[in-house]
Amino acid sequence: MSQTATAPVVELRHFSKWYGDVVAVADLSFELRPGVTGLLGPNGAGKTTTLKAITGLLQPSQGEVLLFGRPLAGDPMLYRAIGVVPDGDRLYPRLTVRSYARLHADLQGLEQPATAADQAIAQVGMEALAGRRLGGLSKGERQRAKVAGAIVHQPSLLILDEPMTGMDPGQRARFIELVRALGQAGVTVLVSSHILGEVERLASQILVLVSGRLAASGDFHAIRDLMADQPRTVVVQADGARELAAGLIAMPTTVAVEVDGDRMQARTRSVQAFATELPRLARAQGVSLREVRTTDESLEQVFRYLVGRR
Amino acid sequence: MRRAWVVCRHALGQLLAGRRLVVTVLLSAIPLLAPALLFSFQGDSDPVDFSLGLFRNLVLPFLLPVVSLAFATAALGSEVRDGTATNLLLKPISRAAILAAEFAAAAAATLVVLLPLLVVSQAIAGSFDATSLLLGTLAATTVGALAYCALGVALSLFIGRALAVGLVYVVLWEGALVSVAPSASSLAVRGYAEGVLAAITAHDGPTVATRLGPLSSTVLAAVVTLLALALASRRLARMDIR
């Protein structure tokens, strides 16, 4: 697949998708070039819808999706350059790992399908399981079999929807190594996940989707720093909550404090500074702490914050 | 073409794998072979009449539509619904070619089950020498299987309970309605199959009374088959795979 160095491999222009009154993705525009890009977002953010639109499984309600500068609709030969690991367990349980990879190689019309299948199986480290039926494998092993099917024809664009679901730590490490190597070899990889740490290990560039909209895009670390600025809520249960609140409100990182009986809820820009100061204050005032916990550590909260910042 | 053959071979393997083949063969063999066996022991009437009756009263109204629709609705529609169709759709093959390959697999699976049983049944009953009856029943089964499979594949892409809806059509339209209003047989696959049977047995076989002539039966069967496939192809090309 020939292309200029600057031409995007994937281009979404004002892509929207809705089902009746429900808007799954709204006015999404981005470009992908060779290397690994993470598509990050909470469940229901529109990641799978976006990936399905890129792979041609869904038609845009509005906007345009271009692969290698061309729309995929009506041009199935573009699939010779695309590998896809779809979400869910979309496998044929009676097939063995080898016959599944071979099926993909045959469907791609490869000259030496058996050799290509064996190579793909080796790339995902499933040589020992090649003769096993897919229905008898663990979820992580089935995911790796799907990856083998997706890379059997050495695609230049690889779309992975939550590929590490069910993989154990060893399998994840090997998978991450494989994806990074493909990215370094010039393959354009788009990998979705709702787990921040997973994406951090895979991709330097990320796209953050929240409620069907692009909340942030660019370098992973810059976006994470943006996330780190978000005030977080800490709930404290203590005998002398009111006395503690007076001390905590004096801290420059504290945004707000609410006291209700022996329960206090504080908003702080630095959980670390809060965690250092709270025990010191409690000790000084002779207050015993019964419970200290943060309430909004979930990724979803962080995403909502990012949307609010835009 | 090579890729379409891979899809067809794979679909046929999926349709005939596991218990589905065993159950279908058993459910078809018992009602088809048991009466033939009983008849061979009693043998008090003409074997040609017996085989013709068995075909018109059991195969055409029951076995042929049930087996065809069971395979056709399991071929593509169920794969689209359970998501396994993505393994085929995300490949350098047009959706029309995938549809044609799945239809061919469903029709082939139907014929693999029914044609040998028809031959064995007529051999047991002693009507094997009536060549035109044998050829007529095989040709009628083939024409019917193609039409039912096209309808089944199309239905399965439009609605979730395609098999049930297909069987309701067979029972209500082809069974009940045609018996009280024979003109309805011009929109009944069973009528087309009977027309083909009548055309082949006309010269030296038993007389088969049908409302549709051989030409109109063949043309209507072809039109229904192609129309159903065209609708299914259009649907598959435009549908979202969730």
Image (cartoon, rainbow, N blue to C red):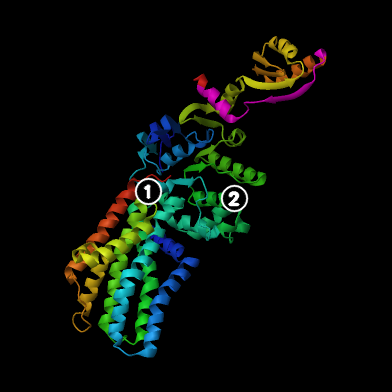
Q: Is residue A140 left or right of residue A241?
A: left
The range drawn in magenta is A284-307
Report the chain holding disc 1. A
Q: Is residue A103 above or below residue A275?
A: below
Q: Give the image location of residue B186, x and y in percent.
A: 20, 64
- Answer whether residue B97 is visible to the viewer in this image: no
Q: Is residue A258 above or below residue A28?
A: above
Q: Is residue A48 above or below residue B193?
A: above
Mark sitting on residue A77: 1
* Crowding at mark 2 (Cα within 10 Å: few <14, some 14-19, many 20+): some
- Camera-side mark, 2 or 1: 2
Mark sitting on residue A139: 2
On-image quarter of the N terminus of chain B: bottom left
Q: Give the image location of residue B30, x and y in percent.
A: 43, 76
Q: Amino acid at mark 2?
A: Lys
Q: Is residue A287 left or right of residue B235?
A: right
| Residue A305 within the magenta-colored segment of the rendering | yes
Q: Secondary structure at mark 2?
A: helix
Between A175 and B13, the residue placed more toward the observer is: B13
- Answer whether residue A241 is visible to the viewer in this image: yes
Which quadrant of the view contains residue B33? bottom left
Which residue appears at 58% of the width and 61% of the height? A131
On-image quarter of the C terminus of chain B: top left
Between A243 and B220, the residue placed more toward the observer is: A243
